[in-house]
Amino acid sequence: MSATLVLDDAQRLLDSAAADLVARRSPLARVRDRRAAGDETGFDRRLWKELGDLGWAGITIPEELGGAGGHLADLAVILEQLGRTIAATPYLSSIVLGAGLIAALGSDGQKAAFLPAICSGETLVAVGIQDGNHHSLDCSVTSAARTGDDWSLGGAKRLVIDGQVADRLIVLARTPVGLGAFVVRPATAGVTVGARRLLDHRPIADVRLDDVVVGEGDVLGEPGGIQAAVGRVVDAATAALAAEMLGSACAAFDLTVAYLKDRHQFGVPIGSFQGLQHRASVWHCDLELARSVVQDAVRAVDDDRDDRPAAVSAAKAIMSELALRSGAEAIQMHGGIGMTDEADPGLYAKRARVTSTLLGDASYHRRRFATLKGYLSTT
């Protein structure tokens, strides 16, 4: 991958095509319709099928395994456009995390069994990373122990994205020799999947594991030797989420600027008021700076740079704060109407509340960045 932070010709074409598809197939009004209908799936299956038909569902998966053989930078282009209308897809759960872990850790047989089906949308995979309030992989307390030729899993995973509809769960658990990754069927005895809704009205799962037995063929990689690979995949998912958040923040800005031009007060557009102009200008500059940071993080993942973890944490910390501020600015600049549920700014603000904490909030990633850069001691 090139170190440049601008889109190449192919990515510009992809960006245009994705923008057109999202505008036609998943406008913001559809988010409201799905919320009103009490959707239990958590994502738009029709949109996901169309993305699969275009070859975009498995865009980061090797061609020989059913994907398109692209890069995370290509996927980030699509995710930014999806973020603009808060369109829900299982990209993060099933492709970046699920397929990413199988591609990084799985045997040839496991890759052949799962990846083509994941890319086609036939199989959905969710990954259990977080045990409690802390996101770090080092905080995992879910355990896995040998029981003869099998493994027994015990513990719980919180905030499992799309876990309520997954055909397979990949559970990260602590073994006597270190971190392990295990493929679990939700219907397995001892597995309890409970769904709840977050502030943005999307469902998410909490998974409990009570003496869940899995076979040796359900183990991804070698327990104790997978931490680095898992870290790379989680970093990829974090950078991908930051790209989606950037799209949502930019859409909230565009929506607000249009309102400032259309809304009149005292016979003039409110956008002519200097105070609002200054706020919008600062907001615009922050979005452009954030774009560079997010694109750098995505390319750091693609190139597996030494500074990848720090670049990813910088992007997520910045976007977690900027997404929240973008939602707040959109609501405030819309005035009283911005506080109503019927107004679109509230949708972006609620989604920002969720995405700002998924895969680590700003505080977590600032601390991680500072530690990686040597500003904080690990002891």
Image (tube, rainbow, N blue to C red):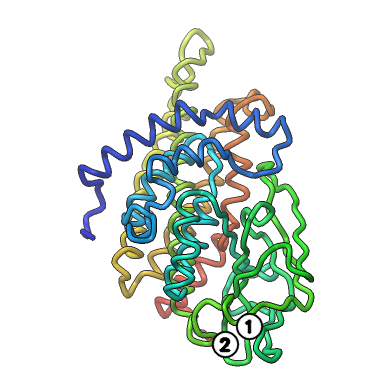
The residue at which mark 1 appears reads as 174
Residue 269 seen from this side: yes
Image coordinates of residue 264 in percent, x first then y, are 51, 12
The residue at which mark 2 appears reads as 178
Q: Amino acid at mark 1?
A: Arg
Quick one: 313 or 126, which is closer to the camera? 126
Q: Amino acid at mark 2?
A: Gly
Quick one: 59 or 13, which is closer to the camera? 59
Image coordinates of residue 206 in percent, x first then y, are 73, 61
What crowding class fits label 2: few (fewer than 14 Cα within 10 Å), some (14-19), or many (20 or more)? Answer: some
Residue 328 seen from this side: no
What crowding class fits label 1: few (fewer than 14 Cα within 10 Å), some (14-19), or many (20 or more)? Answer: many
Q: Residue visible at 63% across and 57% down? A: 167
Quick one: 317 or 52, which is closer to the camera? 52
- Contact check, label 1 and label 2, Cβ < 8 Å: yes
- Where disc 1 sits, the SS reads strand
Instruction: Check the image and report above or below for 308 versus 319.
Output: below
Q: Quadrant of the N terminus?
A: bottom left
Q: Residue visible at 75% across and 60% down? A: 193
181 with respect to 200 (left or right): left
Q: Residue visible at 69% across and 82% down? A: 143
Instruction: Check the image and report above or below for 205 versus 199.
Output: below
Image coordinates of residue 8 in percent, x first then y, are 21, 46
